[in-house]
Image (cartoon, rainbow, N blue to C red):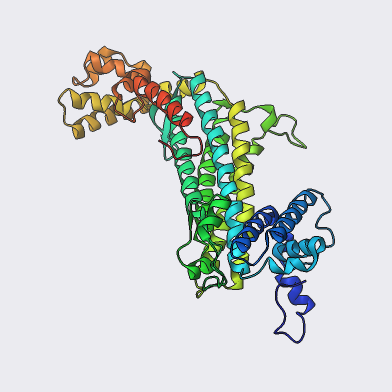
Amino acid sequence: MKLWGGRFETGPSEVFERFGNSLHFDKRLLSADVRGSQAFARSLTRAGVLTEAECATIIQAFESIKVDAASPDFFTGATDEDVHTFVIRKLGERVGALAGKIHTGRSRNEQVSLDTRLWLRDECDRARALIQALLSGLLDLAEKHPNAVIPGYTHLRRAQPVLWPHYLLAYFEMFSRDYERFTEARRRTDVMPLGSGALAGSGFPHDRDAIARDLGFAAVTANSMDVSADRDFALDYLYAASVTMIHLSRLSEDWILYSSEEFGWLELGDGVTSGSSLMPQKKNPDSLELIRGKSGRVLGALNSLLFTMKGLPLTYNRDMQEDKEPLFQAADQVCDSLEMAVCVAETVVLREAVPFTAADESWVVATDLAEALARNGTAFHSAHQIVGRLVLESVRNGKKPGDWTPETLAAFAPEFTADVARLLDPREGMKTREIKGGTGPNTVAAALLEARRRLSALGLSELS
């Protein structure tokens, strides 16, 4: 069964049928297609196309299709062009010729847009719920080690000491922005397209606002040509998914490094690691490596649709069928990766002494010393030079910050007073960074409380 064909003398070739059919991937839109068709049946009734009895028959038939679709062999043997044709055929098997009325004044162009939007709204909600769980997991992990000191890095070189919760709150901010992006993607998706026809608007008196209320949409689309041509909402989702995967990949890279023997800060649980088929000693961070690897697939999905859409004339072109597979793949990968990251966060154990030793034995306190000299009246450029010479002297002689005393510091340079010497302890220098957003202990404690408040306020709304 096809939704077109009267103008053609012969049917499509077998190769074209196989090349153009999309049921094997768009069948996941069946529930959305049924829901949208039920709302359209009610609108056709209001428009006088269907009687109340006909509408009730169609609605019930669609319900039975949804029930039957739960069977694993529901699609077995189906050769329909797409999920829309499949659903109409199944409707015809249940209500006969009455099924022919359901497509009155409706184009597949607006139907595809509707189905994708209904499905994508749910996917935005699914991603946001998983991000909430990850945000909670990061805060749990921060609160387990509220006073742990670690080196912060630039260029993968030890830079300045920070608190472990401050480090995790950086990722909290990243994933909070990801939540906002999915919220915005959902808002742009939450616009009802039915009534647009193929591109010029419907010739039947549909109450589009009533359809929107029926399907829970916040608004209706403003231009029928835009509906037929638009995949911006899908691109918005793919961008949100891509940035989320970038953040997940960066977190994974950190924890892969920090759990390695060379760093030794973290221990990952057995449930999220695997062994080697040859080397009995191995405990590999496969979960994190897979997240890092899957990020490429999601970024590829975004680029795929960008390239598909970049040169299309208005309005609909069959090229746009190619939006589904990258969209579906990205949704699966980002949600699976978020779920995996939540599991990993639950298993992480921080060996506090190891990163503290790394901070204590290195010269991450150098900036603290230079800033202390500047606060005492030394021009910062001169302070930078003095501390740089101190570091060079120490490196040459194998001396750590703790090897210096107030007396030897003062002998090296008179600018080093006793109050400056205490900053050789990385825990002391952090106390000077109580500026909002800094790693000062009081500031970080307050930031953790604020993060908990923001998390509890999320629900299905934007971050407050």
Q: Quadrant of the C terminus?
A: top left
Q: From the top left corner, tell me how far across and down residue 341 is, in percent.
A: 59, 36
Q: Is residue 283 visible?
A: no
The residue closer to the viewer here, 386 or 425, is: 425
The image shows residue 390 at horizontal and vertical percentages of: 29, 26
Q: Quick check: 79 left or right of 112?
A: right
> Of 403 and 43, which appears nearest the observer?
43
74 in relation to 88, above or below:
above
- The answer to whether residue 206 is visible is yes
In depth, the one of 409 and 446 nearer the eye is 446
> Going 73% across and 69% down the picture, which residue do you hit?
100
Query: What residue is at 48 percent from the left and 39 percent from the top?
Result: 175
- The residue under the point 71% across, 34% down is 274
Q: Position of residue 16 (x, y in %)?
A: 74, 76
| Up/down of 61 relative to 450, above or below | below
Q: Is residue 138 above or below residue 240?
A: above
- Counting from the top left corner in percent of width and height, residue 266 is at 57, 26
